[in-house]
Amino acid sequence: MNWSEIFNTLILYKPDEPMLFTSGIFLIWFSLFLWVYSFIYPVKLYRTVWVIAFSFFFYYKSSGIYLIILCFSILLDYYVAQWIYQSTNKNFRKTLLLISISCNLILLGYFKYTNLILGSFYSLLNLQFEPLDIFLPIGISFYTFQTISYIVDVYKGEIKPTENLLDYTFYMSFFPHLVAGPIVRARDFLPQIYQKLVISNEYVQEGLWMILKGLIKKAIIADYIAQYNDLVFGSVTHYSGFENLMGLYGYAMQIYCDFSGYSDMAIGFALLMGYRLLPNFNSPYVSLNITEFWRRWHISLSHWLRDYVYIPQGGNRKGLFWQNIFLLNTMLIGGLWHGADWKFVLWGGVHGFALIFHKLFLQYFPKPHQNSIFLDFLSWFITFHLVAFLWVYFRASSFHDANLFVKHIFMNFDIAYLIPFLNVRTLFCILLSLGFTLHFMPNPYKNYMFIKFSKTPVWGKAIIFVLVIQIMIQLRSETVQPFIYFQF
C-alpha cells in the first residue's frame, strides 16, 4: 500500500468502508484523539473544540458530504431555541417550534421515506416504480429525534438553551452517540458539559469494561452468527424448518448483541472522556411480558416515544379507549422510525396491539401476590417467542419472505436435523449459547466479572483486549459487518 492509498484510507470518506467502532481505522484515530484529549481536557474550550473536530471527522468518515445536513440541523435549532427562550409571545414561540420540527422531519422524510411514499403511490395506480437513488445519512433518525427533544424541552421551559453555539454543537455531534444512539436527552447531558470534568479511575475501568463487552457482543457474537442468519434469511425455502428456527433464534441474538454492543461501546468511549451516557439496554429477553420488554429494549427510544409522542397525544388522561389508540399510534410511529418499509409498520403495530392486550389482561387478571415459577416461565416463553417471531418481519426482505420463513418453521420442522446441525454449525451453536448465557446471567455474576476485570493489572487488560481482537480477526467475514442500526 503506497502513501496515496494510506491517505485515502485514513482521511477520505469511502462509501463502501464507513468508519465503525470495530474497525482498525477507528481504533487508530481514537487512540490519537484520546492521547491529545488527555492533555487538554481540563480546559473546557480546548476540550470542546477538539471533541467537535473529531466528531465532525468521524461523521464525515461515515457519511461524507452529508455532514452538511447535520451542521444545518445544529445551526437551525441552536438559534430557534435561543429565540424561543427569549420571546414572550406565545404564538411566535409556537411558530418557531413548528418550524424547527417541520424542517427536521422534512429532511428525515426526504432521505428516509421518499421511496416508500412514491412506491406506495405508484402501487395504488398499479404502475411500475423504480426507486430513487437517495443516500440515507448515517444516524439521521437518531440526531433528528435528539434535536427535536431539545427544542421541545426548551419550549416547555424544562431546560434552558445552551450558553453558546459550541456547547450545542458538542451536545449534538458528540461522536459516541452520534450515528447509532443512544438518543441523548439534553437534560441528562448538558449539565455534564458545564460541570468541572474529572476523569476518575472508576470511569476508566468501567469504560474499558463496556468497550470490551461491546466488542465481544458485536464483533464476535453478532458478526459471526450473522453469517448463518444471512444464508437462511436469503433463501428461506432451501432450509428445513429446524434450520429456520435456528435462524430465528440467531437473529434475535444478533440484533440484540449488535445494537446493545454498539451502545456499550458508545457508553465506554464516553466514560473514557469523562461523560456518562444512560444505559440503552437492560437484558430485554428476560422480560415476563411485552410491557417489560419495552422498558428494557432500546430504552432511550422508548422514553423518547413516551415523552414526545404518547404523552402529547393525551397519554393516560383521556380514558382507556383513547389511551389504547394513543399507544397504538406511538408504536406505529416507532415501527416506521425503524425503517422505510410497511413491514416495519406492521412490526410496530403488532407490538402496539400486544401492549394493549397486556394492559387489558392485567385489568381482568391481576398478577397474583405469590410468584409462580410455572406461570413466570410461561409468561417469559410467550413474550420471548412473540418478540423473536416479530424479528422475522424486521429482518426478512419482504412480507412474502417473512411469511414463508414462519410457515416453514411450523410446516417443515423436523427435530432429526438437530444432531447434523450441531455437527455442521458447531461454532454458531457455541456463540449463540454464549450470547444467551451472558444475557440471562444474573446481575451479581455480571458485577463480579466487572470487579475481577477492574482489579486486573494493565498488562492483563492489554492481553485480554489483544485476545478479543485476535478472535475478531479470525471469525470475521471478508467485509466488516455494519451495525444493524447504522443507517437509521
Image (cartoon, grey):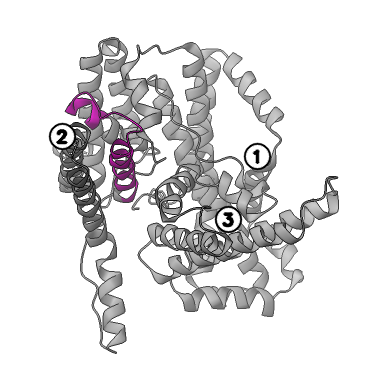
- Range of magenta residues: 141-170
Would residue 222 be seen by someone viewing this image from the given angle? yes
Residue at image point 41% right, 13% down: 199
Q: Seen in the image, is 177 located left or right of residue 61?
A: right
Q: Which x, y percent locates residue 284?
A: 61, 46
State which quadrant residue 398 falls in. bottom left
Marks 2 and 3, the one that precedes in the sequence: 2
Residue at image point 29% right, 65% down: 113
In the image, which is nearer the foreground, mark 2 or mark 3?
3
Front residue of 105/429: it is 105
Q: Do callouts 2 and 3 mark residues in contact (Cβ within 8 Å)?
A: no
Q: For the residue carrying disc 3, how many other residues have a C-alpha within 10 Å: few (<14), some (14-19), or many (20+)? A: many
- The residue singled out by tag 2 in the image is 3
- The residue singled out by tag 3 in the image is 252
Q: Seen in the image, is 394 located left or right of residue 102?
A: right
**Distance in Å between CA atoms under marks 3 and 1:** 14 Å
Which secondary structure, mark 2?
helix
Front residue of 141/223: it is 141
Q: Is residue 411 magenta?
A: no
Q: Do callouts 1 and 2 mark residues in contact (Cβ within 8 Å)?
A: no
- The residue singled out by tag 1 in the image is 438
* Kind of residue sitting beneath label 2: Trp
Q: Which x, y percent locates residue 389?
A: 60, 65
* Kind of residue sitting beneath label 3: Ala
Which secondary structure, mark 3?
helix
Q: Which x, y percent locates residue 282?
A: 58, 40
Marks 1 and 2, the one that precedes in the sequence: 2
Predominant secondary structure, magenta span:
helix
